[in-house]
Image (cartoon, grey):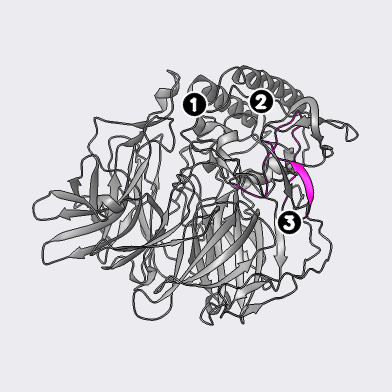
Amino acid sequence: MSHFNLHPLLPLPTIYTPYLTPHSSQLTPSHTSSSNFQFSNTQNTNTPILTSFYLKNTTPTNSITMPSPASNTWINTTLPSSCSSPFKDLASTSSSPTTLLPFKKRSSSNTNTITCSLQTLHYPKQYQPTSTSTTTTPTPIKPTTTTTTTTPHRETKPLSDTKQPFPQKWNFLQKAAATGLDMVETALVSHESKHPLPKTADPKVQIAGNFAPVPEHAADQALPVVGKIPKCIDGVYVRNGANPLYEPVAGHHFFDGDGMVHAVKFTNGAASYACRFTETQRLAQEKSLGRPVFPKAIGELHGHSGIARLLLFYARSLFQLVDGSHGMGVANAGLVYFNNHLLAMSEDDLPYHVRITSNGDLTTVGRYDFNGQLNSTMIAHPKLDPVNGDLHALSYDVVQKPYLKYFRFSADGVKSPDVEIPLKEPTMMHDFAITENFVVVPDQQVVFKLTEMITGGSPVVYDKNKTSRFGILDKNAKDANAMRWIDAPECFCFHLWNAWEEPETDEIVVIGSCMTPADSIFNECDESLKSVLSEIRLNLRTGKSTRRPIISDAEQVNLEAGMVNRNKLGRKTQFAYLALAEPWPKVSGFAKVDLFSGEVQKYMYGEEKFGGEPLFLPNGEEEGDGYILAFVHDEKEWKSELQIVNAQNLKLEASIKLPSRVPYGFHGTFIHSKDLRKQA
């Protein structure tokens, strides 16, 4: 995921993982004539409710009572277990132009009747934050596996914190300006509704099914466990994702959603679960206003309409109705635990410091500038050197030079001076790589051209005339004068899994997934997306590169989102653990790939079960010794679980049954209990 950083008041896209389309989840958003919604997020019951993404005021087959104006979450919805996933492949045709309605306050007594555009399903009724006790008896993994059944305990803390950190104390002029600008936005939405949205910006596609958002969930203890949690798993698994708090009023890309962290904490063979929004400056202001007001970098900033939305935001800023000077990021992409801080990141802002509480809940400490040392954005994939503990990062700008900077932090959090890397034009750099001695920087063919908006296009452009290349820079460089650039034609890697040095051939080996079409995540196209796991060799002696697919043509599959053993990052590794992104953009399992031989071992989640990024948790000195952790959602039963798989034999060790749906998301990490005790 990555955002564009135009100016303190002007963001652009959030570029995140390979899966840029809908989730299929226990919650499906519904579009109504009101700006108010509710999330559904609980255990299965036999409450029949409608599932719809855009609802119409017509004679209903079923009806739903809309929430009061005070609510700022989504409509309670569900899908029957007999129903296929509401999500349709991105290649399918987006439906007719969507009527997007402005946010209006409405009497709480008003009841809307609606017709569902999908199907009627049985979903759990909305979770009530009262203490309840349920007993679940999971089916054993296999006949010889013991089943541990525990009684979940629900905390009484409300699901959503409605505190208003920015009280509205507007004067007469501000109130008049707010009213006038709201009228302008209403007219803009009315104009936009007359034109069909591309699938890459259509909320009905982007946040359908289990890509749909969920409410916050306070820490739930002693979850049901099928099988046995390995003793070495002691700490907390956290995973980030996009989870829009408010229903989109216009275009929306999956990467645009507000950041939400899901956490499973392991203690003495038991597990707890919680999920919380990362309380960004952006989210706090929108909460205080009760509606979305910040521009959505990918879904909205296209063509003349995108320019209009930027001008609208600038006007609101001029009257101090909103404030983008303290960051506009959503913090929905990456997570890293560094120097006793858990950091949630997106490319358009500084990181946010998130704390894990003693009972496994999460709380946002605030925007984190490394004690005043960082004054620019930081990409969501910093690299933690497993040997010396240094954190390496990039920052890019899409408006002004320098378009790219490199910096690092020592293990105790001291920042190096910025190294300005000269680029001719702003380039999307979602990821990079490190080796023992070098930083490997991709300069590829997806670039930012804001002038394209003037002619009605997208600012994210595939430049077919540009030659992709990789830059090699010493980790401890003070400037970019000695940086070597090596061309790698027609190469676009959204993610790089590892890189290492081979001194005997004077080469740097880069492992990444090469994606075609390169801009298909952001711009609608007819060609099917392919993500090919590749080995790219950069010869420092000759200045030439070679590239080959690691997997044979006969076994070729889309592999995106995953990792190598992070204790070996920057060093030669034999195995990579990557998501099987099929049927795209869903993830039906993961693959353990031998990077030397090309052998592929697959682990499938099961019929109508899909997941996301597999996290490899090392357990010992051997590279392949460890466990895979992955959130998995059953689209038939509409329930979620965390699976723990032995990485050596790909056998399921344990399944933790979760109290609420977990949408498909982005990247995660694991924090061991000994490190948690030292949290800042």
Task: Identify the residue at image location x=18%, y=53%.
Answer: 538
SS for tag 3?
loop
* For residue 604, side relative to residue 77 (left or right): left
Does residue 505 sit above or below 59 in this rendering?
Answer: below
Q: Amino acid at mark 1?
A: His
Q: Amino acid at mark 2?
A: Leu
SS for tag 1?
loop
Instruction: Give percent across and percent down for residue 121.
Output: 71, 44
- Mark 1 vs mark 3: in front: 3
Does residue 488 sit above or below 238 in this rendering?
Answer: above
What residue is shown with label 2? 100
Does residue 226 sit above or below 253 in this rendering?
Answer: below
Residue 40 covered by magenta stretch: yes
Instruction: Give percent across and percent down for residue 83.
Output: 64, 44
* For residue 506, side relative to residue 184 (left or right): left
* For residue 169, side relative to residue 437 (left or right): right
Of the 4 image quadrants, the one containing the C terminus is bottom right
| Label 1 CA crowd tier, 10 Å (few <14, some 14–19, many 20+) | many
What residue is shown with label 1? 302
The range drawn in magenta is 24-52
Residue 61 covered by magenta stretch: no
Q: Number of callouts in the render?
A: 3
Task: Identify the residue at image location x=79%, y=57%.
Answer: 158
- Mark 1 vs mark 2: in front: 2
Q: Amino acid at mark 3?
A: Thr
Task: Identify the residue at image location x=36%, y=32%.
Answer: 527
Q: CA distance from mark 3 to mark 2?
A: 29 Å
Tell me which numbered mark, 1 or 3, is placed earlier along the sequence.
3
